[in-house]
Image: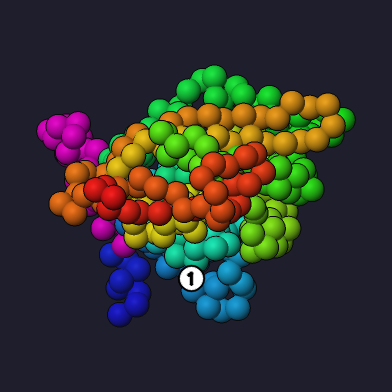
Amino acid sequence: MAERHLLLRPQARRSRLVARVVLASVASPETIRKVVAADVRRRLLRLRAAVLLVVAAGTGGLVVVLVGRWLRRWFGGDLGGLPLGPKLPWGRQASNIDDPLFGTIKYSRSGLKGDDNAWEIFMNGLNFPTHSPIREHIRQLFSRPQFDEELRTLFDWLVVDGSERLTCTEAERFSQGIKGHLYVLTQCRKKVPLVNASKEDQNWLREKFDEIFPEERPLNRENFNGFAKLVLLRRVVRTLMESIGLQKLQGGVAQPLVVQVRVELGGDRPPFKLHTVAPVSRPALPSGENLCRIREGDGDGMEEGDEDEAEFDFCDGSG
């Protein structure tokens, strides 16, 4: 029976060849393309099955990874949905990075390595409306060419001896140098200072920095901006969360909010400064409550350095 099968194989091959010649002479280019694609997919499935058999025999999983990467490079990354394993952008398996304080928020490694969507992932993770006025304001601010250039200048000030990459120590210096305050537009004497970098943030930076920014993919001038925007925005949002709570913040603010941020580097370097006014992001409320008052510790006014005694408070607009 086996001999009969072997004798039939050349005849079957000739039949397929004749069928292809006939198809090429009468079919449209689109039909030919689909047939060729189906044939390639069938061959890839056979190849994958063969590789899996080799792995099962004890050769090792490295063969699957190497063959999968080679096939992706050959076919431009499109394998018709064949599950040939994960893409490996830096020679190792890509995985998400958990936010040090908000565990449900996960950043892609590419996002933390320069893509400007990392701050959007942060806002999504906290369930801020995608098209809210405040997010549109942030998009406009972060997309300004002048702001990007100012961040690049900040990078140049942070690096030591003209290095082309930021070290963990220099990244910590950036994080710990963030100062500033927030206040309602009409109440400039009642300011809330920005929170400091948390212990979780500092530990996360020390433990994850070399993993996220290895030698072959450093935190350099080209991709610093996306990282800096995320860090700056997280600090402002954390300040508001500690002052009024996440739930109220998600609903939006009913008064324009002034945001003044600076990054102090010490020495003779001038601080990096960011000043913006966040717009009203909350619709009119039936109860009349709004972000209208800041509680104070003692007295009516505030002097510079006393901001830590104040916090935002929601109150009745009639009061």
- Could you tell me what secondary structure mostly forms the magenta stretch? helix
Residue 129 % position (x, y): 29, 48
Q: Mark 1 — residue?
A: 52
Residue 131 % position (x, y): 28, 40
Q: Residue furthest top?
A: 146
Name the residue rendered at 35%, 74% in the picture: 3
Identified by mark 1, the residue type is Leu
Q: Residues within 10 Å of mark 1 (few under 14, many from 20)?
A: some
Residue 176 % position (x, y): 71, 47
Name the residue rendered at 48%, 40% in the picture: 183
- Left or right side of 204 for 12: left
Residue 138 shows in the view: no
The correct choice, above or below, for 307 with respect to 221 in the image is below
SS for callout 1 = helix
Region in magenta: 9-34
Q: Residue furthest right?
A: 161
